[in-house]
Image (spheres, helix red, strand yellow):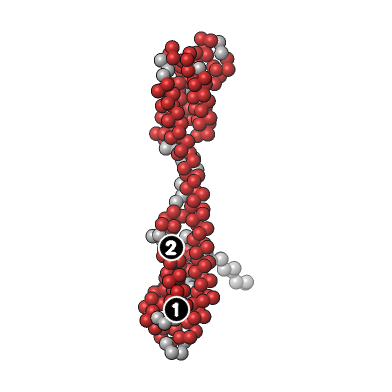
Amino acid sequence: MKDSQRARLAMMQATLAVLNQHADLYAANTALTKARATLAELVQDLDPTATIQQGAARTESPGAVKKATKNLLAERTAEVAAALLALADETQNISLHTDADYTERQLQRATDNDLLRIAKNIHARATEHAQALAAQAVTPAELTELQAALDAFRAEMTAPRTTIASSKALKQQITADLRQATALLRNRIDKFLLRYRRPQPQFFAAYQSARQVINTATRSEKPTAPAPL
């Protein structure tokens, strides 16, 4: 939440506190009571401890795959690639040799997208040549392990992107809630309070004081131009 938004929230919290403190004075005013309840719901959602705020504060980066997950995929891919490379040499299969010619270190140093692409291709080629690879003790279980490592890697690649999208949506929701609360104060509660200006001057004055927006945002001051000589 931005400093300007925090300032607006602080004003709303102070205003709501005044309304709650003097609730008995307008208990018979159904419209004001209902407006106060709506404001309370919005302020609760906007509170920094609320779930919506916690979600918006997340800052995960796209493609933040854990090192252990990447190393495991590189290891499983290299093991199967080694068997494919031996088969390619045996059968003089140049295309297969090109697809399988990777070391574990190369795979570990590859980008996430490149590793995903290579590992998927290795798995597909190994599945294609599964019968021939059986002579090198490449079992279906080994290919299953490679697929599991692929799935885990892919999940960690995509999960942060989902978080980013959710965070953006939550920030938009915060902005919408602030806008709704501001409109509720200006178009409803401020007008309702006019009825209490003369009969309940202390209540009205406390409300007006709370409604003053306190701008806590830090602003850089422009350098003062030197006075002409």
Nearest the eye: 109 or 95: 95
Residue 21 lies in quadrant: bottom left
- Residue at image location 48% in from the left, 52% down from the top: 167
- State the quadrant of the C terminus: bottom right
Around disc 2, counting alpha carbons within 10 Å, would you say few (fewer than 14), some (14 to 19), or many (20 or more)? Answer: some
- Please report the residue visible at 50 percent of the width from the left and 66 percent of the height from the top: 178
The answer to whether residue 5 is seen in the rendering is yes
Identify the mark at residue 108; answer none if there is no mark: none
Residue with the most extreme right position: 228
Q: Can residue 111 be seen?
A: no
**Badge 1: residue crowd in 10 Å (few <14, some 14–19, many ≥20):** few
Q: Could you say where residue 210 lies in the image, as x and y percent from the top left?
A: 44, 76
Residue that mark 2 sits on: 45
In the rendered image, the vertical position of residue 64 relative to residue 84, given as above or below: below
Q: Amino acid at mark 1?
A: Thr
Element type at mark 1: helix
- Tell me the amino acid under the disc marked 2: Asp
Give the image location of residue 161, x and y in percent: 50, 44
| Eye-nearest disc, 2 or 1 | 1
| Mark 2 or mark 1: whose residue is earlier in sequence | 1
> Residue 70 appears at what percent x and percent y?
44, 32
Image marks 2 and 1: residues in contact by CB distance under 8 Å: no
All told, the count of numbered labels is 2
Say what secondary structure mark 2 lies in: helix
Q: Position of residue 76 (x, y in %)?
A: 43, 25
**Residue position for label 1:** 30
**Residue at image point 59% right, 68% down:** 225
Report the Cα–Cα distance between label 2 and label 1: 23 Å
